[in-house]
């Protein structure tokens, strides 16, 4: 038993190599999450750090936690957050607005407190002996069974309270974002009558320039080569995020016409030579 305990407490060369390589990647990802200027890059860095943590869980025998880390946190929550950031279009100017006074000092204090707890936990684990996940999993017949036994017996009240808090937060977010309708909703007939009386009777044109671009921030061109404002969203126009490629498209069109004229000219010369 003493030999088994000593062997379990020792770290092999492969485990040490894995820890230092993946640990370095996790720390770089965590620092990039805080230091990156763009929110999309920060979200991608945080997703990479979560994937590395999942690998650590799997390497230590916590298979359930590793799968949950990838499926729930990285695959669902982080990707949802990333898509929301990409759709909303958070810019660097938005991050300069400090809505809560003193939040940086509070964040620094929380970071220092978390660092102290982390150092204390690592020191406690280094000084005391531990059984490891192998013994804990074998006691209940597996990692999933052991977690289920702890969650629904010893920590059942903490688990239920956490679920109640999450549900309360979800309902609170729905209540805070709900807007009361101040006027009666228009019927389909009323909207169609307003459309007929308005200036734009047919549907709005699609974005893009001569089918060479399908991006929503590129306006379509009118027959005279000027961009059409009806082809892009008003939100993008207000933000100034519209790309004007009319000059580029007109230059390409002129080049195409010139090549066509040269080709037609050569064809005419060939016909005259043949005659």
Image: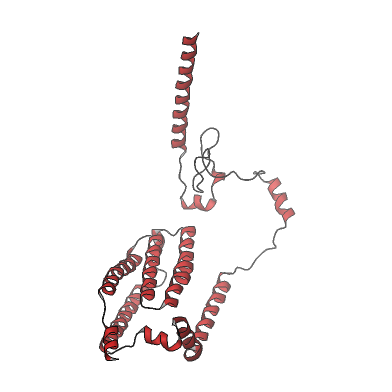
Residue 237 locus on image (x, y percent): 50, 49
Can you say whether 12 is above or below 234 in the image? below
Q: Where, by quadrant of the figure, is residue 105 drawn?
A: bottom left
Q: Residue furthest top?
A: 275
- Depth check, front residue: 197 or 130: 130
Q: Work out whether residue 63 or residue 231 is closer to the camera in this orientation and state it.
A: 63
In the image, is residue 87 above or below residue 75?
above
Colour scheme: secondary structure
Q: Is residue 242 visible?
A: yes
Where is residue 134 shown, x and y percent of the image? 37, 84
Q: Residue 43: x, y in percent? A: 40, 64
Left/right placement of residue 48 relative to residue 254 reads left
Give the quarter of the image for residue 8: bottom left
**To which quarter of the image does residue 170 belong?**
bottom right
The total of numbered circles placed on residues is 0
Query: Which residue occupies 52% across, 77% down?
Result: 169
Q: Residue at x 25, y 73 (%)?
A: 13
Q: Compare residues 32 and 136 and report the one nearer the observer.
A: 136
Asked if residue 96 can be seen in this view, the reply is no
| Quarter the N terminus occupies | bottom left
Measured from the top left, where is residue 61 in percent x and y? 38, 78
């Amino acid at each position: 038993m003493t030999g088994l305990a000593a062997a379990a407490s020792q770290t092999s060369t492969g485990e040490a190599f894995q820890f230092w390589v993946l640990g370095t990647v996790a720390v770089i990802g965590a620092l990039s999450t805080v230091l990156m200027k763009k929110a999309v890059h920060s979200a991608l860095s945080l997703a990479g750090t979560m994937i590395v943590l999942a690998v650590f869980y799997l390497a230590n025998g916590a298979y359930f936690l590793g799968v949950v880390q990838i499926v729930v946190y990285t695959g669902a929550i982080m990707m949802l957050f990333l898509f929301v950031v990409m759709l909303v279009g958070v810019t660097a100017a938005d991050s300069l607005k400090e809505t809560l006074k003193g939040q940086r000092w509070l964040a620094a204090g929380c970071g220092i407190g978390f660092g102290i707890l982390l150092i204390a936990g690592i020191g406690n684990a280094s000084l005391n002996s531990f059984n490891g996940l192998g013994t804990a999993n074998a006691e209940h017949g597996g990692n999933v069974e052991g977690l289920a036994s702890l969650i629904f017996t010893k920590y059942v009240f903490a688990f239920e309270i956490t679920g109640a808090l999450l549900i309360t937060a979800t309902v609170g977010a729905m209540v805070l974002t709900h807007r009361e309708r101040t006027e009666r909703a228009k019927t389909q007939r009323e909207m169609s009558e307003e459309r007929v009386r308005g200036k734009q009777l047919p549907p709005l044109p699609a974005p893009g320039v001569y089918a060479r671009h399908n991006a929503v921030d590129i306006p379509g061109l009118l027959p005279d080569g000027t961009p059409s404002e009806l082809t892009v969203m008003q939100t993008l126009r207000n933000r100034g995020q519209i790309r004007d490629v009319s000059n580029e498209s007109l230059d390409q069109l002129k080049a195409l016409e010139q090549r066509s004229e040269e080709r037609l000219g050569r064809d005419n010369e060939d016909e005259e030579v043949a005659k």
